[in-house]
Image (cartoon, rainbow, N blue to C red):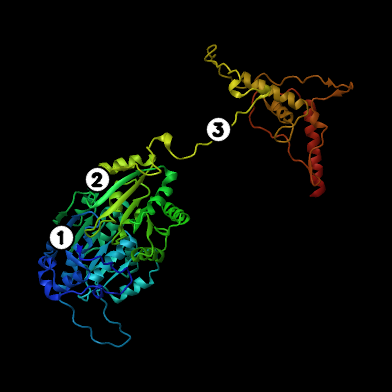
Amino acid sequence: MTRATDQHIPHTGTASHPSSAHTVDKAALADSPFTALGLIPELVLAVAESGYTQPTPIQQQSIPPLLKGQDILGCAQTGTGKTASFALPILQLLNAQKKPAPVETKPARHPPIAKKIRALVLSPTRELASQIEESFRIYGAHTGLTSTVIFGGVKQGAQVQRLRIGVDILVATPGRLLDLMGQGFVSLTDLQFFVLDEADRMLDMGFIHDVRKVLKALPPVRQSLLFSATMPPDIEALAMTFLRSPVRVAVTPPASTADRIEQSVYKVGKNDKPKLLAHLLKDANLSRVLVFTRTKHGANKVVKQLAEAGFRGEAIHGNKSQNAREAALAHFKSGETRILVATDIAARGIDVDNVSHVINYDIPNEPESYVHRIGRTARAGAEGVAFAFCDWDEQGFLNTIEKLIQKRIPVVSDHPFASTGARSERTESVPAQRPQRLGHGGQSRSDRPQRTTRSDASPQRTARPAQEGQRSRPEQSSFKERGERTERGERTERGEIRNDARADRGERSGHGHGPRPAKPPQQDGSGQRRSDGAGASREPSRSHGRPSSHGPKPSGKSNGGGDRARGSNTQAQRERTERQLDWMKRYT
């Protein structure tokens, strides 16, 4: 609807009426274009008090068939007056029904009969649900019909109390509605009108299963409506499941943008986006700016960066409490806050007049989201401006958006942070190269002669498969080296001399070449004979007087081959076992 003057609708929760701001000549209501659509004087008066003078195309096409009781399948972009197109006829049809007789006064212990829910509007987000309920309350101010809104994120006590009193129109989000239905606080048996608003957003947010559950609880006889900004095939398939011979209403091609919105793209690096945003906000023409980010963390980060640059802004997203979200939205509506940073979740519920600029700080990865974002400006016949900051990584998203809207968005290159979009010109810093480490002899690794591979020299020889009880040549050489280290008395990582375990395996092995004879004792520099079992003379490690229990671990299978030292190692094993038994007898 087109307004005669710019008048802000009071935010959710206020009881003020717009009649105090507009003086309406009731005699002139008969000549109103809304009267020509078939609306009753009470609704025409409420519309005139809100400042609207002309119906929008979606309202001109939707209101007459709805008043005739037909189902509607509507496709129109945001900001075209979809809410009034279904709110006004529903209010008129409910008001035309015979009103029940007044309830007789009963004793205090018997509460009055509560109203039954006769109209249900399903919305994807809290903000949008609040906006819809507010529109019902304003347009139905002279009808006596009541309405309320329920959504998650807040305690249900106040919502349940309102439902117990009874309402005619209920606006709800799918999650909280199913929750209260399961608790028995919501009954849809007397429902006459069902509206599924922003159906495409319902599908994007994963509410399709909740929507199907709600559809199963609806009575068979009802009037149903579906409105969506875009009309993908999945939405049409869903509409055919509960709409009966609907009247199709489409005032603009699906996923198209308003002609009154001036769109432009700024090619800028990711790290320069905060600087570009601060640079643009210095212009006084950006009087009421809505900035969209892709993530909740990104929204908080932008608010912090704006504060460092000297600009006050507030964030609104799913992690904020409902009271904080409503407060931020109220500050933005009243003009107390010039900048509001939001995510796509909140994009559908921000119905604020005179939003001068919409800035896509992050290009959305879903092209339909771009249409909904920039639809927050140029509402109710006004004009608006939409900027988009495009990094090199987001060029693919921009191409998809241009393909969807079938329009080439002009690029603004005259700004101090312009980027051509090439990968080499991105603003991310390049890490410094690490200095080359010098090896032995003062040569760097790059200066060393490269080792020749087998493929460059001679063809690789095919290894023969090792028979049972035998080892391949590399394994034998490694065992030989480890055996020499053990003979010098070195300990392995387990803390024990591996000769003990090898001797044990050699005694139990009954295949292969058998155990090899032990080497003759060697002499050291003093002429003394030294045994190979150097670990036998070494005292085992003790912990608080307790001898170490680390001994040879018997193996159930042989690894092949024998050991070079057996006799002295076996003696060391017996001595170690005797000391352990002696300790056990002493302390047990």
The answer to whether residue 557 is left or right of residue 5 is right
Mark 2 or 1, nearer chain start: 1
- How many numbered circles are shown? 3
Q: Is residue 206 visible?
A: no
Identify which amino acid the numbered label 1 is placed on. Ser
Numbered tag placed on residue 405 in the rendering: 2
Quarter the N terminus occupies: bottom left
Can you say whether 127 is above or below 206 in the image?
Answer: below
In front of the other: 152 or 283: 283
Which of label 2 and label 1 is nearer to you? Answer: 2
Neighbour class for label 1 at 10 Å: few (<14), some, many (≥20)?
many
Identify which amino acid the numbered label 2 is placed on. Ile
Image coordinates for residue 22, horizontal then vertical, percent:
22, 73
Can you say whether 563 is above or below 301 in the image?
Answer: above
Numbered tag placed on residue 300 in the rendering: none
Q: Is residue 276 visible?
A: yes
Numbered tag placed on residue 433 in the rendering: 3
Image coordinates for residue 334, horizontal then vertical, percent:
34, 66
Image coordinates for residue 105, horizontal then vertical, percent:
25, 87
Q: Is there CB contact under 8 Å for labels 3 and 1?
A: no
Numbered tag placed on residue 62 in the rendering: 1
Mark 3 or 1, nearer chain start: 1
In front of the other: 104 or 402: 402
Q: Which residue is at 27% across, 64% downward?
A: 132
Label 2, label 3: how many angstroms apart (C-alpha)?
45 Å
Q: Which residue is at 40% across, 44% downward?
A: 416
Identify which amino acid the numbered label 3 is placed on. Gln
Neighbour class for label 2 at 10 Å: few (<14), some, many (≥20)?
some
